[in-house]
Image (tube, rainbow, N blue to C red):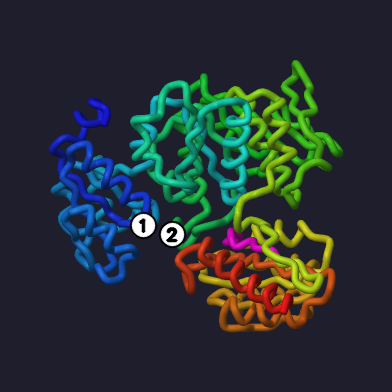
Amino acid sequence: MREDIQRDWQGKRVAVVGLGVSNRALIRFLQAAGAVVCGRDRQSLGEIKDVAELTSLGIDLVLGDSYLEGLAEYDCVFVSPGVPKDLPELQEVYAQGKVSSEIELVFRYSRAPIYAVTGSSGKTTTTSLIRDMLRAHGASVYAGGNIGVPLINEISQIGPDDCVVLELSSFQLDRLPVNPRGALITNLAPNHLDIHHTMEAYTAAKENIFLGQGKTDFLVVNYDDPITRAMEAKAQSKVFFFSLKGKALPGTYLDGDDLVYEDGKERIVFAKRSQIKLMGEHNVANILAAALASRLAGADWQAIAQVCREFRGVAHRLELVGEVDGVSYYNDSIATTPDRTQAALNSFSQPIILLAGGSDKQLSYTELGRVIHQRAKQAVLFGATGPAIRQAILDSGPCPIEMVSNLEEAVMLASKVAETGDVVLLSPASASFDQYSDFTARGEHFRSLVSRLTTKGGD
């Protein structure tokens, strides 16, 4: 443990609110630095996942309804990103300036430059592309935040010659003062309004990714998105753009089959659309964004072009998980918002049987209903949002729709009605929390259900 970190935390009394994976790593870090840690969670001990790992940490625990009591007595309070920030008990410690997070400590203690990515969709793909592009250039890269393993326990090993690439959610950015060397915003559309309540509050949380930057830093934004394009006026950093629709200078754009970088001094075609293995125009936008950020971070065009050609995507994002009797099954469980599902539907030319539904994030399905009516051969709906999606489809006109209880029933029904050449697409347009711990668990269940179909097909 570094001496400067130990000086900061030796003997400090800290509370960690929320006992998920990232905060358990944080607890280990704080313990190693000499802090006295109390863990707090709304769940009871029997409800907490991997409770044996938690109890092995040997910390005091305050669980259940009283988990937020007495926080003002601590030197510092670390709040999990998923905990609502407007709870009265948290408002008190926010007013005292005592609140921190694992991500804030990564920013505080990292000796390497940090490149941060946020947006409503495409964050993980874009973060992964930047990581791979910098590595192809020869850089030592640590990736974390909302992706991969928590970086806090590796912070002492990260040196000034390394790079850190972070995917940051609106929850992680909310009230977080950060100053990344480079920031990237993929797009903004309504999301998490059940937590942020308004689009304005959600946008304000996202803007924290660049508001602390200086003139030597850079910001990459989506020129085609009017919300992100307008952020140029608020930025102190140098602003670059990416676009699918035409020249956006300085920055990257799509010109026919060419992916182009242009800054007024040079014009470079660094990749071909026809060579990209990722499906969908939204992924071309992700590549344009990642290539631009990677170049500004120091990667050469040869390394960037190599990753553009070779990158095959990230699990649960338009992932082909099986083919049975000429029917292709795609896992797009990451699609927890209507705009993500719209992008997925527009990625295929084949007939689509859409599997959608889940828990409610207080989002509108009106436009999605129109796209499903236009693009889907049939919709199989489930979960809390199933009825709302159904009504949005019918508002656009007649469409074959089936309502089922869960994903297993949806896959079985789709397998019976699908014909050779069809696509069965899991793209829920909803969160997963009504039936799953997260979108990953939902995607893995879909993969296992398709695997069973494959096995039966081979008998």
Residue type at numbered disc 2: Ile
Q: Residue furthest front?
A: 459
Residue under the point 19% across and 48% down: 37
Q: Could you tell me what secondary structure mostly forms the magenta stretch?
A: loop
- Bounds of the magenta span? 330-337
Lateral position of residue 72 relative to residue 171, left or right: left
Residue 8, picture quadrant: top left
Residue under the point 64% across and 75% down: 452
Viewer-nearest residue: 25 or 337: 25
Answer whether labels 1 and 2 touch (C-beta < 8 Å): yes
- Name the spot of residue 341 as percent of width and height, x first: 67, 61
Q: Residue furthest top?
A: 265
Residue type at numbered disc 1: Pro
Q: Secondary structure at mark 2?
A: helix
Where residue 378 is drawn, which disc sits there? none
As drawn, 331 above or below 183: below
How many labels, in total? 2
Where residue 195 is drawn, which disc sits there? 2
- Name the spot of residue 299 as percent of width and height, x first: 62, 25
Residue under the point 44% across and 30% down: 179
- Earlier in the chain: of badge 1 and badge 2, it is 1
- Name the spot of residue 451 as percent of width and height, x first: 64, 70
Disc 1: which residue: 84
Spatial CA span between label 1 and label 2 = 7 Å
